[in-house]
Image (cartoon, rainbow, N blue to C red):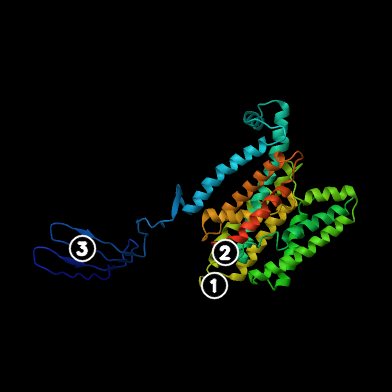
Amino acid sequence: MKDVTPAVRGGSSGTKDVAQAVHGGSSGTKEVTPAVHGGSSGIKEVTPVVHGGSPCPTDVTPPDSVVLRTGTLSWLLPRRSAFAAVLLLPLLVLLITLAVMASSTGMSLSQTLSGILGTGDAGTVMIVRDFRLPRIFTGLLVGAALGIAGCLTQTLAGNRLATPDLVGVNEGATAAVVAAAAGSATGMVGNWWLGPVGAVAAAVLVVLCAGGAGSAGYRLLVTGIGISTFIGAVSDLIMSRENDNTAGGVFLWAVGSLNGRDWDAGTPLAVALLFLVPLSLAAGHRLQLLRFGDEVASSLGVDLRRVRTVALALAVLLAGTAVGVGGPIAFVALAAPILAQRLTGPTRVPVTASALTGAALIAAADAIGRVAAPVELPVGVVTSVLGGPFLLWVLLRPDPAAGKA
């Protein structure tokens, strides 16, 4: 104890006011200032103020957040984000169940459960385990990847319409797969890795034409639309010069069909998500500061060019891999982040909620496509039919996060 300064006022029978300042000490507390009011018989009020040293045990959890604790670890989770997860997870389980049951002939819940558990007849088990579950598994991964990619690009550009569909990423991935299929001897679509390769090539072209990854969001959006249109025309030209068998197979893939996907089809995307999702969550925290403007974000220590470059690279890899595995399924990257934003609030970057919403949209579209028409509809056709009215809804309603579309 280096410095103790007591101040005593009042009579000899008691202490009315004591102010003591303590600096240093072995406990690690640098400064403690207690104020005591009352007579000598007891202490009526104590108001401690602690600066430095060990943290104050007082609960300082923000009113709009909850703390999740597991042993010595704890996470601070916004209440609306927790509500979104609690709402979306059961909804996703329900949609997966309906997607497994959905067919032109129908399948009861008991048959579905017996097929999943392997206790039903051989035909039911084969249909559920070998055909429907792998297809749904792949679709869920594709939806999650597209949802996260759309969330990153929308936040990066500050525009709800800035999705991989519109900035050339999906068209680049599609063109690479179409060109490879046209040049192969069999004319079959394969080699999922061509998707991210084409997406990266298209993204590099967009960034160079827009003036760099740190360019304003509207420049990336407008440049991406122009390049996307050009690349789409190249893909159409390639398919128009192929025979009917090759063009038919490529077209079925290009509209976003999950038909024929087995367990191996979704494995590359599952591995990619294991690495890209944590990076996307970290990037989302930085992108959240961009909502306050570039000047405020810079003053808080955010490297704008680096954050934008990393976010764009993650979005490109996610969207490109999703397209390579499941085809260019439209409107999921647009709708998932917007719906997730409605659940989590306008101040958050809803990376996790966007992934869950994207997976739910794919599961719902897959179920609808198998029961809505006599002939099974590809997932991409269903999302396009539903995406048109949704786009009009987005354009007619104000953006709660930025006040503009």
**Compared with residue 235, is residue 135 higher up or lower down, i.e. above or below?**
above
Query: In this figure, which residue is indicated by the disc labeled 1?
Result: 298
Name the kind of residue labelled 2 in the image: Leu
Indicate which disc, 3 or 1, sits on the residue closer to the N terminus.
3
SS type, badge 3: strand
Query: Of discs 3 and 2, which sits in the foreground?
Result: 2
Which residue, given by chain and number where applicable, does mark 2 sit on? 287
Nearest the camera: 27 or 70? 70
Mark 2 vs mark 1: which is more N-terminal? 2
**Which residue reaches farthest top?**
121
- Which label sits on residue 36? 3
Q: CA separation, marks 3 and 1?
A: 44 Å
User: Residue 340, how many percent across, how many down?
Assistant: 57, 54
User: Could you say which is closer to the camera, residue 389 or residue 219?
Assistant: 389
Disc 3 crowd rating (10 Å Cα; few below 14, some 14-19, many 20+) is some
Where in the figure is residue 361, as x and y percent of width and height?
Answer: 64, 48
Can see residue 278? no
Give the foreground label among 3 and 1: 1
Which residue: 52% across, 72% down? 296
Quick check: 101 above or below 182?
A: above
Query: As shown in the figure, which amino acid type bears the numbered disc 1?
Result: Ser
Query: In the picture shown, does residue 12 fall above or below 184?
Result: below
- For label 1, the SS is helix
